[in-house]
Amino acid sequence: MRVLLINDVAKYLNGGANRVVVETLEGLHRRGVAVGCIYQSFDSEVSREIWTRKVPHRLSPAELRTQMLAAIADFRPDVIQSHTGQVMSSYPHWVPQHACCQFIHDESWYCSGGNRVSRGLVHCQRPHGVACLAWHVLKGCGGRSPKGNFLRWQQAEKRTALREFPRLRVQVASAFMARGLVENGYPTDRLDVVPLYAAAPGSISLPPERGLIVLPSRLVYHKGVHVLIDALSQIRDLPWRLVVPGDGPEKMALQDQARRLGVAERVELPGELHPDLVAGWYARAQLVAFPVLREEPFGLVGTEALAYGKPIVAFAGGAVDEWLWPGETGIKVESKTATALAGALRELLGNPERCAAMGAAARRRYPQFTHEAFLDRLMESLERTRAAQPR
């Protein structure tokens, strides 16, 4: 099978979705699958043995369509899998002629607010529609700019056109995301749940550092890093140190918050790190935190905690239930407040033996989230995609 992936970039950048693309290319290549990638920005980090084609992102729709069709013709794929919506204007020109699937990583594909929650963190189950423009104001589920809300609404309107392609399959990482698509009119017979994975830790073996809490995360509001810092500032009688590998627009605000709360010397924000460096932090951690405020579409941090045998403390919601076994592999915090989070963190920080037991349980759960298990499920979905396309 010849499989062509399409994404904005072909490198580790800004979170899990781009990492999934790079590791999918490398993993399928190791299995002997002929893989290629069309991308638009930055330089590729995939193996030179893998076919790649860079298509500039600042093109007119006609120019973009011409270059995309030329690249597809050069590679001659059996299946095309897209991870981006940036080239959707060209979809009508290749989707009917090729076996295609779209991996949807977040709720912005069917929610102009981006993550289907109000400013009060109440989850919405309304399907995308014209009424959303009013709800952005009434429920605060969008931004504060009417123009910005309208532009995002237009983008969601264009993306929901995916459901109108009769043979295009849609892949998501969680049953939670699948429910969202069904609520928005996507047919269940063209939906595949392909849970994501965590790379195996390899040979790295380090003793856990007492009190070390790790949270690889983009530094944006909905990731809840500010709530975690607030929670930890309430635990002054126990040793702890927080490391948050990642970058984003909230970095300076988080540093100011840590100084204001008097815990700046315990909070480290080292910036965006390569996965090999993040692996070292996971290996040394006593526990992993996941204080995401939105309904999480998947949460790679959860499966990475399983891989490294670390207990995780996470806010409830979204796909968290699909990789967290409360009381066995970690603690699920129902109330998304700093006080509730502090109570859960205190339970584990003060009990290294319980952390070790939960870590052992996490390792036992990990095999269902290995990279190889992901590739097996993905290949099954790609085969279904190809089978639906007339010869």
Image (cartoon, rainbow, N blue to C red):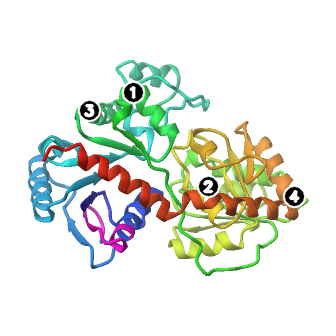
Name the residue that disc number 4 marks. 236
Q: Please tell me which residue is depicted at 38% across the width and 66% down the height of the picture.
A: 22
Badge 3 marks a residue whose secondary structure is helix
Q: How far apart are the two marked residues, 2 and 4, measured between alpha carbons?
A: 26 Å
Residue range in magenta is: 27-42
- How many circles with numbers are drawn on the protein? 4
Quarter of the view holding residue 26? bottom left
Quarter of the view holding residue 56? bottom left
- Disc 4 residue crowd, few under 14, some 14–19, many 20+, Cα 10 Å: few
Q: How far apart are the two marked residues, 1 and 2, measured between alpha carbons?
A: 27 Å
**Which residue ends up furthest to the right in the rendered image?**
237
Q: Earlier in the sequence, mark 3 or mark 1?
A: 3
- The answer to whether one can see residue 273 in this image is yes
Q: Are marks 1 and 2 in contact (CB under 8 Å)?
A: no
Name the residue that disc number 1 marks. 184
Q: How far apart are the two marked residues, 3 and 4, measured between alpha carbons?
A: 52 Å
For residue 91, side relative to residue 301 (left or right): left
Name the residue that disc number 3 marks. 161
Q: Earlier in the sequence, mark 3 or mark 4?
A: 3
Name the residue that disc number 2 marks. 302
Badge 4 marks a residue whose secondary structure is loop
Q: How far apart are the two marked residues, 2 and 3, measured between alpha carbons?
A: 32 Å
